[in-house]
Amino acid sequence: MNAIIRFENVHHTYSEEAHESLSGIDLSIEEGTFVAVLGHNGSGKSTLAKHMNAILTPTQGKVFVSDLDTSLEENILEIRRTVGMVFQNPDNQIVANVVEDDVAFAPENLGIPSDEIRRRVDEALRQVGMSEFKLHAPHLLSGGQKQRIAIAGVVAMEPRVIVLDEPTAMLDPQGRREVISTITRLCREKGLTVVLITHHMEECVGADRLIVMSNGRIVADGTPVEVFSQVELMDREGLSVPETTRLLYELGLPTDVLDVESCAEEIARAFR
Amino acid sequence: MSEIIVESLSHVYSVGTPFQKTAIENISLRIPQGQFVGLLGHTGSGKSTFVQHLNALLAPTSGKVLVGGTDINRDKKARRDVKWQVGLVFQYPEYQLFEETVFADIAFGPKNMGLKKEEIEERVREAAGFVGVEEDLFQRSPLELSGGQKRRVAIAGVIAMRPGVLILDEPTAGLDPAGCRQIMDNIRQYRAGTGATVIIVSHNMDDAARLTERLIVFDHGHVAMDGSPEEIFSQPEKLISIGLAVPQSTALAMALREKGLDLDGAVFTHEQLIAAVRKLKEVGAC
C-alpha cells in the first residue's frame, strides 16, 4: 500500500469561525488513482484540498504528503513540488502574455535549466492537447482551453499529484468535457494521482474512487457505483445521483452500472 | 404590456476591421408577455449577443427590436426607458455588486428611476422577499455574503426595477445543486407573483426541460430550433447534431427505444421517464 497523501484525524477551524470546517478526517490516497471529492458549498471539500499542499495546515491532527508532515516549514517546498494545485477561475491563474511562457513560469521558478524547461513545456502542452496554441495569447482562448493551460503549468512542474479545486465551475459543457478528459488521461497514461474537487456528480463517474463530504466529515467513500447506489444518503445530502442510477433504483433493479448503455441493457433484460 | 417583437435582427462585431464577425443573422421572433423561455446553444452561438439587444445594450447592425410596441432604438429616451422594462442579469452578477450595503445595492436601480424614498424602500423589500434575502442582511456589506447570497442580491437589484421582462444569462453557473434549486425557485416565484416574461440563457438541459414552456436553440448566429420542450426534445438527433446534450432522461429513453422497448411520448424529465417505463410494465403484464 502506497499512500501518497495521508490524513490522520484532521480538524480545521478558520480562526474567525466558531464551527469546524474539517471534523476528524482520516483518509489515505493511493498513488496513481483518480479520486473525486463531491459535496456542497461549505461541506469542507475545498478546505480538504488546501490541506493537500500545505496552503492550510491542520488545527489538530496531521497531514502527510509522501510521508512529509505538512505542518513543518522545512517540508513545504518539497510538498509543493509533489502536489500541484489548479483553481476555479482560469483568469486568475494566468500570468504571461504567451501560452508557452505561462506554462514555463513555475519550472523557471524552480530553477530548472532552460533546455529542460523547453522539454517540459512542450511535453506538458502536448499532454493537455494544446501544443498548437503555444504561441497564442492566453486571454483570447476559451475557458476550457485556459484551464488546460493552467493544468499544463502544473504538469510542467512534474508533480506526482495534481489537485483541482472545482476546475470546471466557470466553464461551459464543452470546456468541462475538455478538462475532465484531460485529467483522466493524465492519470491513466502518466500515472499522475488526480484529486478532483467538484459539485457536479457527472464528473465523478469516471473516477476510481468517490468521496462525499458533508459538514466537515466524509459521509461516503467507495467506487462511484458503490457511492451512487446509496440513493437515500445522496438525496439526504441534497446531492443528485445519475439518472441511470435513479431509474434502476426506482424500478427496484440492481444499481450496479452507471453508463446509459449498460443501464438500458439491464432494463431491457428485466422487461423481456 | 411588454411583448417582444424581433424583426430581421443582425449584429456584426468590429465592422470594417480584420476581426469582423457576424454574431447573429436575420433573426425574427415574437415573445408574448408572460412566457417562460429558455435560450440554448453553445458558447459563441450568438445567444448572449441576442439578449443584449432586448434592452438596447447593443444596437442592431440591421433589423428592429420592439418592446410593448415601441422601437427600443428609436431615440435616446427609448433606449433608456427600456432598461427599466427589460431587466438583464449577466453571468456572475455577484462581481457587479459595488455599494456599501445590501440595501443600497438593491436600491440602486429604483433610485436611478427617480422614485420616491418610500417607493424605493417598498421595492427593495419586495425584491429581497422574492429572492429570499433576509432583512437582517440589509445593512451588511454585500462583499461579506456567501456566493449564493451575493448572486441573489444581484438578482434582487434587477427585480427591484419591476421589469416586465426578466432576462438571466446562466443564472445558476458555478453554484452547487442546492444553490441552483434555490435560484430557480426564486425566479419561478417572481414570475408567479408578477406575470413577468422570463428568459433564461442556459447550458443546463435538465433545467431547461423542466422549467420553461418554450425553448429557442441558437446555432452559429441563427435560430436552429424553436418550440415547446416536448417538440424540441422529441428531436434529440437534431440537438446532438448541433453539438448540444440532451437531458439525461432523454438519452436513456433513446437507448431504451434502441433496445426495442416501446416508450410512449416525448421524454425529457425523470418523472416522464419513470412513468413511461412503468406503463411498459403494465402493458407487458397483460
Image: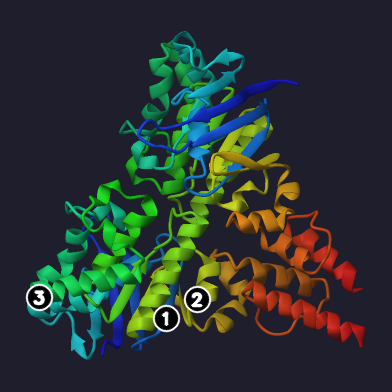
Q: Which quarter of the figure is the C terminus of chain A placed in?
A: bottom right
Q: Are marks 3 and 2 in contact (CB under 8 Å)?
A: no
Q: Which residue is mark 1?
A: B36
Query: Upstream in the sequence, badge 3 or badge 2?
Result: 3
Please tell me how crowded label 1 is: few (under 14), some (14-19), or many (20+) other residues with Cα within 10 Å.
Answer: many
Q: Is residue B93 left or right of residue B83?
A: right
Mark yes or no: residue A252 visible. Answer: yes
Q: CA distance from mark 2 to mark 1?
A: 8 Å
**Disc sitting over residue B211 in the figure:** 2
Q: CA distance from mark 1 to mark 3?
A: 29 Å
Q: Which residue is mark 3?
A: B115
Residue at image x 33%, y 88%?
B33
Callouts 2 and 1 on one subunit: yes
Q: Secondary structure at mark 2?
A: helix
Q: How is the image coloured?
A: rainbow
Q: CA distance from mark 3 to mark 2?
A: 33 Å
Mark yes or no: residue B203 visible. Answer: no
Q: Quadrant of residue A113?
A: top left
